[in-house]
């Protein structure tokens, strides 16, 4: 279903602004300056390690230049192209939906998202009651949501390259209460897990919470300024969640299989963005609940 824009549902952005103003989150400009200084210092250290290797230094400097120039384009592209086009498309679709509601074809505007494009065109030209069809599809969707996909399809490949990461090689972490994923943003954060599946869950994230979600997109960026850490089901080191977490200096582990199912709300967890591990601190959580 296409996501509503701020102009369609201003409560979304108003709620985020209110939460930011009433929480003890760091000043964005101060945080931006701090992270920029850390990035500059890190680049200098890496270049110093290549002293005496001018060709490698030149390659690293070129890579840094390209990354700094291209990095901002990702969010700009997502906002001005992807999100803008989707917003306009959604507004047009809902105008058609309102027409179908008036013709008693569907019950409410959002029902149109359960129809195919050719079906919508046919119903506009030759109106007929489609409510039973929509109800059946809503039931099917609910059934599909309850299913869990298998970890892999077909015969599982066993890499022979010992240099592959443990996650790539399919090695499970047998340490008690530890989930493993990809190291996405350095640092260690401890806080209560907050399962975030939709934008409606944003308001549930409190300062310092560990946000646990499937993945993120530009709409989720405001929550990064509130959360204390991030864990995702999907993605790698170049995913949107990983890139934005690094920009915010937020410890993050991505690609943790079924994290949204294996973790629960208010569970005390520790995110180690350096090792790619998420540790469940059951003892502390139980003591706090007692």
Image (cartoon, rainbow, N blue to C red):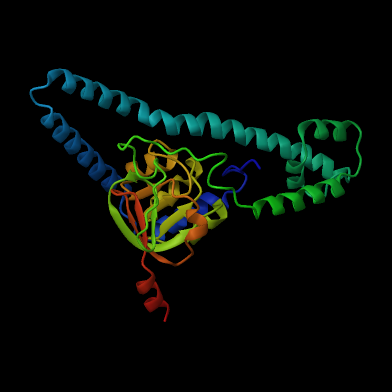
| Residue occupying image coordinates x 56% and y 33% | 84
- Determine whether, in the image, residue 139 is placed left or right of residue 6: right
Q: Residue furthest bottom?
A: 290
Give the quarter of the image for residue 88: top right
Residue farthest along the left direction in this orientation: 52
- Tell which of 158 and 206 is nearer to you: 158
Residue 287 placement (x, y as % from top left): 37, 78
Query: Is 214 displayed left or right of 184 in the figure?
Result: right
Q: Position of residue 259 (x, y in %)?
A: 47, 54
Question: How far from the left and from the top, in percent, is residue 193?
Answer: 43, 61
Q: Position of residue 55 (x, y in %)?
A: 16, 17
Q: Residue at x 83, y 45 (%)?
A: 101
In the figure, is residue 134 to the left or right of 198? Answer: right
Task: Identify the residue at image location x=27%, y=51%.
Answer: 187
Image-quadrant location for residue 52:
top left
Q: Which one is in front, 191 or 80? A: 191
Q: Is residue 223 above or below residue 86?
A: below
The quadrant of the rendering that contains the C terminus is: bottom left
Q: Is residue 79 left or right of residue 169?
A: right
Indicate whether 79 appears above or below 211. above
Residue 255 to residue 268: above or below? above
């Amino acid at each position: 279903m296409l996501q509503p824009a701020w102009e369609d549902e201003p409560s979304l952005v108003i709620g985020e602004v209110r939460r930011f103003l009433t929480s003890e989150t760091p000043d964005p400009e101060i945080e931006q300056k701090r992270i920029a200084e850390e990035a500059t210092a890190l680049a200098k250290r890496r270049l110093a390690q290549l002293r005496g290797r001018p060709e490698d230094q030149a390659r690293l400097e070129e890579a840094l230049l390209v990354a700094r120039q291209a990095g901002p384009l990702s969010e700009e592209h997502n906002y001005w192209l992807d999100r803008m086009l989707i917003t306009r498309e959604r507004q047009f679709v809902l105008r058609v939906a309102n027409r179908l509601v008036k013709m008693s074809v569907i019950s409410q505007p959002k029902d149109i998202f359960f129809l195919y494009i050719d079906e919508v065109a046919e119903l506009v030209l030759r109106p007929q009651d489609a409510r039973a069809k929509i109800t059946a599809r809503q039931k099917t969707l609910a059934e599909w949501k309850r299913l869990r996909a298998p970890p892999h399809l077909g015969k599982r490949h066993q890499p022979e390259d010992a240099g592959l990461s443990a996650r790539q090689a399919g090695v499970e972490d047998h340490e008690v209460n530890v989930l493993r994923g990809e190291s996405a943003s350095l640092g260690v954060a401890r806080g209560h897990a907050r399962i975030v599946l939709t934008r409606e869950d944003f308001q549930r994230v409190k300062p310092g919470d560990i946000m646990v979600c499937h993945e993120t997109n530009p709409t989720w960026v405001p929550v990064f300024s509130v959360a204390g850490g991030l864990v995702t089901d999907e993605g790698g080191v170049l995913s949107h969640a990983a890139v934005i977490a690094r920009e915010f200096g937020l410890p993050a582990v991505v690609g943790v299989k079924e994290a949204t199912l294996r973790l629960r709300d208010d569970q005390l967890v520790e995110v180690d963005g350096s090792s790619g591990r998420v540790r469940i601190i059951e003892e502390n959580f139980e003591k706090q609940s007692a």
